[in-house]
Image: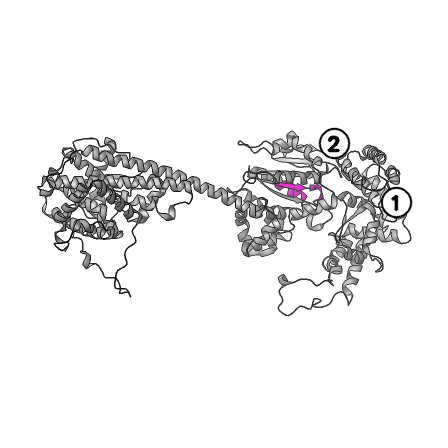
Amino acid sequence: MTEKSQKKWLKWPKKLLGGRRTVSPAPSATSSTNVWSSDQGNTEHGLNTSSIVATESCAPPFPSAAAAAKAARPGTDARVPDDHQPPAASQALPPALPAESAPKPPPTESTEPPTPVPSVSERLWNEAYDSLETDNAELVESYVKMLETVLGANLGVAPDTNISAELHNPTKRQMYMRGLVEEGQAKISRASKITNGVGDIADFVSSVKGMIDLAVQSVPQAALPWAGVCVGLQILQNPAQATKSNLAGIAHIISRMDWYCALTEHLLNENNVADGKDFQAVLRQLKKGIVELYRALLQYQMKSVCSYYRNQGLVFLRGMLNLDDWDGDLKLVTDAEAIVQKDAAQSFQEQTKASLENLVEHAEGMERRLGDIHQDIRDFISLQKVGQDEKCLQDLFVVDPQDDMDKIQKKKDTLLDAGYNWILDTKEYTAFTNWNSGGSTCRLMWVKGHAGTGKTMLLMGIIRELSSQSAKLAPKVSYFFCQGTDQALNSATATLRSLIWLLLVQQPHLISHLRSKHRNAGSSLFEGERASIALSNAFKSMLKDSELRPVYFIIDALDECEEGLGDLIDLISSSLALSDKVKWLVSGRPTVELKSPETSDSLVELDAQKLKRPVNAYIDHKLSILKTREGYNDRILAQIKAEVRQQAKNTFLWVALVFRELDAGAENLDPVHGAYAVEIIKEIPSGLSELYDHIMTRIEKGTRKDPQHCKNVLVAATLAYRPLTLSEVAILAGLPSEIHPRTIAKKCGSFLTITGEVVNLIHQSAKDYLEKNFESRLQKAGPAQGHTDIGTRAIDAMSSVLKLKRNIYNLDYGFKPKDLTPPDPDPLAPIRYSCVFWVDHLCSLSSDNS
């Protein structure tokens, strides 16, 4: 402790301390003392004292210990006037109540009072006492006799009682020490009444006496170290009987006494101790250091007490030696304090390390249980609890993007690494994925290409690449695939709902920006004409949230967004100004123009040069499949490879459609033999539109009524507001019951794909072709007649007695829809589309006529 710190701790008259320095570790992290002037004290508290030495909570060498110390005992700061505040030195303190006058506890079944469980602090004080007694029996014995002689007159101890022997029992030792503390407090109080001395010493003694009261009342078994403090206070009241060095040491120890007692309750409390062998070793070292500190404290107290009463003439103390090296004895205390501080700091470091290791272990366990840290959305939903936020997510839900991506891939083809790896090496992608400090210059990446150039497969590859990055560092990915063939997935509202839904699944705290609105409006918040406005406002609010984590927003086929495309493009542009934690990746045909200046440096155009290598890799992949079929030898495969590469014009879709033609012949639907493959490919024209013409011509050359059945199916697939099931196709296309709809769908060639029971147009370009050539190739009367036919057939199907009737599932009264499991076969399956969309076709008929 420096001279400045010493003065801060004890501003006693220079004649008492003589300006000497006391060697001590800096108490900045473990203790603090406020010295107030008499004017300030009188103004705020009305205390008639010249100065107040207020000992605050003394904490261990890290902040949490201070909080623990305050929680373990009431504050002793002289500035806080409460019921526990000790009075000023000039005010008489009433003697402490004797033990027998305390309120008696209510009677219990047992007549013997339970033995109090020793605290951590008490155990260490006892250990220090026993160790000191073993190594310095003469000092301890003299100290005990002195306490018995000086303070023990009123303890009611039988004359023949061997106090020294009794003190070997820790429980009885605490009992005697508590009695000595009470007797010592009484003597201090009596001395303060009869002495005329006031000022720093008197105020300090009064303050510490209050501290003793609180300590012993809160923890009755903590009397061992405080018994010596009581005698030490008497020494301070009679400073003429001690040296200046001894007085300074006594003051140092007393002023820090409650810290000595409090630190163990935090540092060594079992509730605060982490498991682990390494940490236990540090803890044992810390415990050893605290015991050594306590031993040094007790030794200093004992020597001080014995020296004081030797000067007063106690006979049995006259022969004691080595009671004058106060600087050396105090240095033992301060050195022990420094060791405890060092060990406590190491303990804190080890505990922090152990906590971090536990967090890492917990995270690894969670990763094992959850699998991919980016999580399967379906599993996440099944684990969520029922509640308002979960209901909000359910109402917001449109489609699971992960499931949608899997469905699209099955409908298209295998996602090859070579089909998208090339873009990962481009400067545009490198700049786009750079999140370095200072802000990225590329925050919007636009992939532009004509129909069939592989934009969707490219974005799926990028999504998987971004999602496979380290979960602890990687930004989240929220994505959506616009699909012009499905009314539920081709609007700006559906796009925004899906992006927000996946964002909330990944960052649940952002749902607060939707919670209140959803509570008031329910599911209607996300439906209707004004849904896009509410969603846009909520989305912007989420982006401005300070706790938003970095995220990629990805939209595929922006050109297939048929409703609200302009508003969606405006939202993309404005979002870049709201948060630097947002990046956008969008794809579309050249007909779509983004209004952001950032696209000038981030445009990736899928031209022939960029697509040559990935398209050739795709051709090689398809040839490897043909190699296993009959008739496809190396010579045939080489001819097919050359012919396809020549005509493909680096268009993925054209290549895919050509190989689909080889999968099924025009008439028997069996795979084409290798001997005819080259000839068939040569008949297929280059270019998508020409290829679709070729397929339609082949359909029109079908046998008997097959061409009309195929056209009716294509009309239904083109005009429908969502993909149809096979049973729905049979009704809306008016197919005879004798013909299975799957058979006719397969004869539609490469226009349609069948996934399970669902029929889809193979590509948006196929729908564009059929709409453009509707009157010339499908129905001369035009789309209006097509809507009329579909609406009429839908109404006829619903009117059938066997199809639609009241309570068709025969549900019991009070049955809840959420518990419904449709019967198998489901009588509503063929007319489900008709029940929902029949009126939409009638409305479309009116709009087409107008």
Is residue 220 among the parts visible in the rendering? yes
Q: How far across and down, in percent of the image, does residue 834 sit? A: 75, 59
Q: Marks 2/1: CA distance?
A: 32 Å
| Quadrant of the rendered image containing residue 626 | top right
Q: How far across and down, in percent of the image, does residue 628 sit? A: 80, 41
Apparent side of residue 479 relative to residue 385 in the rendered image (left or right): right
Q: Amino acid at mark 2?
A: Arg
Apparent side of residue 560 relative to residue 256 in the rendered image (left or right): right
Marks 2, 1: nearer the viewer: 2
Magenta residues? 553-571
Labels 2 and 1: the sequence-earlier one:
2
Dot 1 falls on a residue whose secondary structure is helix
- The residue tagged 1 is 697
In the image, residue 562 lies in the stretch drawn in magenta: yes
Q: Which mark is residue 613?
A: 2
Chosen colour scheme: one colour
State whether residue 13 is above or below residue 93: above
